[in-house]
Image (tube, rainbow, N blue to C red):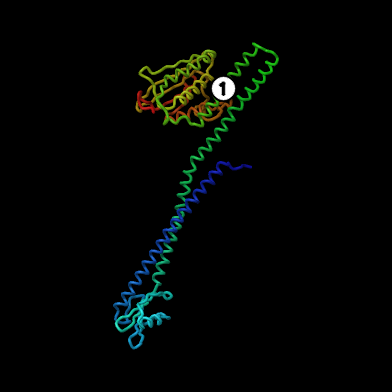
Amino acid sequence: MNHPDPDRVLLRRARRTLAIRNAVAIALILLFVGAVALLVVEREERTALAASIRQTAATEEDVVDPPAGSWIFRLDAAGRLTATADAPAGLPDRAALDRVRAGGPAEQARQGEYLLITRRRGTAIVQVAGSLAVEHAETRRLLAALGAAELLGLAAAALAGWLLAGRAVGPLGDALARQRRFVADASHELRTPIAQLHTRAQLLDRDLRAGAGAELAPDVRRLLAGTRQLGEIVEDLLLSTHLAGRAGNGTEVDLGVVADGVAGGFRERARAQDIELEVRADPEGPSIAYGREAALRRVLTALVDNALSHTRPGGHIRIELDRLDGPARVQLVVRDDGTGFAPGDAERVFDRFARGHDDHRRFGLGLALAREVVTGHGGTIEAANAPEGGAVLTIRLPAAEPGASGS
């Protein structure tokens, strides 16, 4: 049974939570804006209706032809009441008419679905009723429009929230993936060297207890070699976690100096394997790139180590440095006349722990980290077989002019 990746589950949950929160926040904002708009429209419509019936009460001379949606009631000095034809049932408000007739002030009141204005005009008392039905119909239309806008806004908010949440959790996913990859790399790469060191230490302890002396020198050398190998692996893993290709924090790096230093570190090993190791620099001037010297040195170390591992005794390894024009770039080539790559393996060499097509050659971690560093420096790295045999690994980096700012 396949279990879901816990990191993916965590990221999906975080993305879903962020999307929901964004959508809810935007929905609440839309609701608030809609409610304010509705209150403002209702107030404006009611104010307009009140002004209209107030104008009607002040200007109309009879009850025959009031404005649409309103009715006039007139109580004369003799107490006779006249009204507009088809006046709604329940109107007029006789109590309001009587209060104003008895000397009370003009009144404005709401009765059911009508707004009433009652005032004195000459010797008569006039009451005008205006229907709120138009206002209510307009309110319903506004509510329908706001509801549709709310739904569309909610859908847009959900989509935008999902996309923004995806971008927000992207770095988290990258960090989790890098963390898990580092743990996998560490466990994979450190397991064998640690086991070998433990075994050699046990053998050395046993020999010391048995009183052995000079015979222990080979074991001590192997122990030292194992600790050196373990240190190199730890350095690679730390390089992986820091992604040392961040050249933004770098300085000017003279790749010729780096190449001489790396070649010098491998001289003894090359002589022991009967392999000629040389550096050929561009005679036109220094090959200067911009980046982190320690990271670029580690890259070149990985390339030379790979060449030494696959070059037979009597072979040759050459580090070549050239400066390319248009745009200005520095080219670093590690060329050997060793076994080369099987067809189809030229790209696989940069995959972590990949195996060759023959399933015997293992590429490990060094070249994969080399590509990460070179790419991070804005460069490229390629692997190919030389026509005359052997492998050619080519790095191209943006050139830095001598004396340029490198802070």
In the image, residue 275 lies at what x, y percent? Answer: 51, 14
Q: Is residue 103 above or below residue 372?
A: below
Q: SS class of the residue under badge 1?
A: helix
* Quadrant (top left/top right/bottom left/bottom right) for the C terminus: top left
Residue farthest to the top, as pictured: 214
In the image, residue 206 lies at what x, y percent? Answer: 69, 18
In the image, residue 132 lies at what x, y percent? Answer: 40, 72
Residue farthest to the front, as pictured: 103
At a point 64% along the width and 23% down the height, the residue shown is 198
User: In this figure, which residue is indicated by the disc labeled 1?
Assistant: 229
State how many labels appear. 1
Question: In this view of the protein, which residue sits in the foreground, 271 or 389?
Answer: 271
Residue farthest to the right, as pictured: 210
At a point 60% along the width and 16% down the height, the residue shown is 221
* Quadrant (top left/top right/bottom left/bottom right) for the N terminus: top right
In the image, residue 42 lies at what x, y percent? Answer: 39, 66
Q: Is residue 257 above or below residue 129?
A: above
Q: Is residue 326 above or below residue 112?
A: above
Q: State the image quarter where residue 108 is shown.
A: bottom left
Q: Is residue 274 left or right of residue 327?
A: right
At a point 34% along the width and 88% down the height, the residue shown is 78
Amino acid at circle 1: Gln
Question: In this view of the protein, which residue sits in the foreground, 383 or 295?
Answer: 295
Q: Residues within 10 Å of mark 1 (few under 14, many from 20)?
A: some
Q: Is residue 288 above or below residue 246?
A: above
Q: Is residue 332 left or right of residue 223?
A: left
Residue farthest to the bottom, as pictured: 78
